[in-house]
């Protein structure tokens, strides 16, 4: 099958080595250098799946992730809500008015279950939690599920993590106090690493305790699946530098905007500084970026009145990608969700044929 044809009359398999069935080997390491394969462009591309509504139907999720894999996408992401309370007063960090659109539906699939479903229906594409709210689940149980996901997917798991924002959901799940969520997240990451790498795991934190048990099987990836720390606040940047394998911001947080190359570069420098202060090699920190507002139908105004990055023509988006790649961003997750399932597939195809082959 030759695949779709772009406006130049070139099939993806002719212009993009990602489309070759044997082009992408299995991922078994954590650095951006090791994530590359021969002939690949530097940037990896990903898309997210819906967790509610018609686009979260079993048949469409399977169809979408298979379509994404066939188009050459590298990563599929899954968001995290266990339940949606009927009344939510917490401020959603990624909208200008602080409102969360999912409240009205009150519907959501469970993240790790969907991640396993997507992995089971694919062979090469990496599956990412984007992000997993760490306090939502007990530490040992979460570590076991994640390790099992990595084993059963053949080493295709990326663990995006965050501290969370919806206090009402924390209360419904009877987690540790919402105000302690940052400390919980740090504790969990340290406990995860201990369980995944030690034959005799021992960890005694404030919110996670591991002792007197075996933890097998270990994850396939060595030493463990890459941990991408989400968030844009100062504590999130510190967590990424001290504990993460990568920093994974969403650019649209109005309180801590990372929506221009200049702002992002400042954030990346801060993460590297935290890594160095923690005795880590700053060069070992990888960088991803989430641009959920991506739009190829026209320019959108940015915070400063200029064109918002990743909006406009394909040529403009390609130029944005190259600029972010120059900064050191190696993984770009774009918002390709349409109003209908078919529109979503169409947007994925346009990005794969009009942007991905020309982005480096």
Image (cartoon, rainbow, N blue to C red):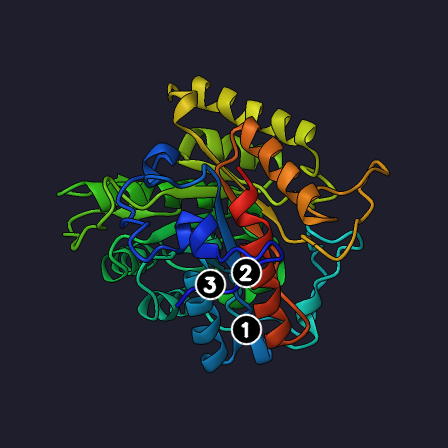
- Looking at the image, residue 230 sits to the left or right of residue 221; the answer is right
- Point out the tag, 2 or 3, that comes first from the N-terminus: 3
| Residue 108 badge | 1
Local SS, label 2: helix
Separation of residues labelled 3 and 1 (CA atoms): 22 Å
- Residue visible at 53% across and 76% down? 56
Task: Tell me the SS state at disc 1.
Answer: loop
Secondary structure under the numbered disc 3 in the rendered image: helix
User: Along the line of sight, which residue is nearer the eye, 53 or 41?
Assistant: 41
Coordinates of residue 142 in the picture (x, y in percent): 34, 57
Q: Name the residue under label 3.
A: 68
Label pair 2/3, CB-CB below 8 angstroms: no
Can you give x and y, in whole percent of width and height, for residue 215 in the image?
A: 18, 52
Neighbour class for label 3 at 10 Å: few (<14), some, many (≥20)?
many
Q: Distance between the residues labelled 1 and 2?
A: 15 Å
- For mark 2, does the 10 Å Cα neighbourhood hold few (<14), some (14 to 19), or many (20 or more) residues? many
């Amino acid at each position: 099958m030759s695949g779709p044809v772009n406006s130049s009359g070139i099939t993806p398999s002719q212009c993009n080595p990602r489309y070759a069935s044997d082009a992408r080997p299995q991922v078994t390491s954590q650095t951006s250098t090791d994530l590359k394969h021969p002939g690949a462009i530097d940037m990896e591309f990903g898309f997210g799946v819906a967790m509610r509504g018609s686009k979260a139907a079993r048949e469409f999720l399977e169809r979408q992730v298979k379509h994404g894999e066939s188009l050459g996408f590298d990563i599929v992401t899954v968001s995290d809500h266990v339940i949606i309370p009927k009344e939510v007063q917490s401020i959603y960090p990624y909208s200008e008015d602080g409102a969360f659109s999912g409240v009205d539906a009150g519907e959501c699939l469970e993240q790790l279950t969907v991640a396993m479903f997507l992995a089971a229906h694919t062979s090469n594409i990496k599956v990412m939690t984007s992000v997993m709210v760490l306090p939502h689940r007990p530490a040992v149980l979460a570590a076991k599920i994640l390790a099992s996901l990595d084993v059963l997917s053949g080493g295709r798991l990326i663990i995006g993590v965050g501290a969370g924002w919806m206090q009402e959901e924390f209360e419904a799940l009877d987690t540790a106090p919402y105000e302690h969520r940052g400390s919980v997240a740090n504790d969990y990451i340290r406990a995860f690493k201990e369980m995944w790498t030690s034959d005799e795991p021992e960890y005694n934190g404030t919110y996670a305790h591991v002792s007197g048990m075996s933890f097998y099987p270990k994850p396939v990836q060595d030493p463990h699946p890459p941990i991408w720390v989400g968030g844009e606040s100062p504590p999130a940047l510190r967590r990424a530098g001290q504990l993460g394998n990568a920093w994974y911001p969403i650019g649209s947080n109005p309180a801590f905007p990372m929506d221009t190359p200049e702002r992002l570069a400042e954030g990346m420098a801060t993460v590297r500084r935290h890594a160095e202060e923690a005795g880590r090699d700053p060069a070992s920190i990888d960088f991803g970026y989430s641009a959920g507002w991506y739009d190829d139908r026209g320019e959108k105004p940015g915070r400063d009145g200029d064109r918002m990055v990743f909006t406009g023509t394909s040529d403009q988006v390609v130029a944005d990608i190259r600029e972010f790649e120059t900064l050191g961003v190696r993984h770009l997750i774009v918002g390709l969700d349409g109003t209908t399932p078919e529109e979503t597939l169409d947007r994925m195809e346009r990005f794969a044929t009009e942007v991905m082959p020309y982005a480096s």
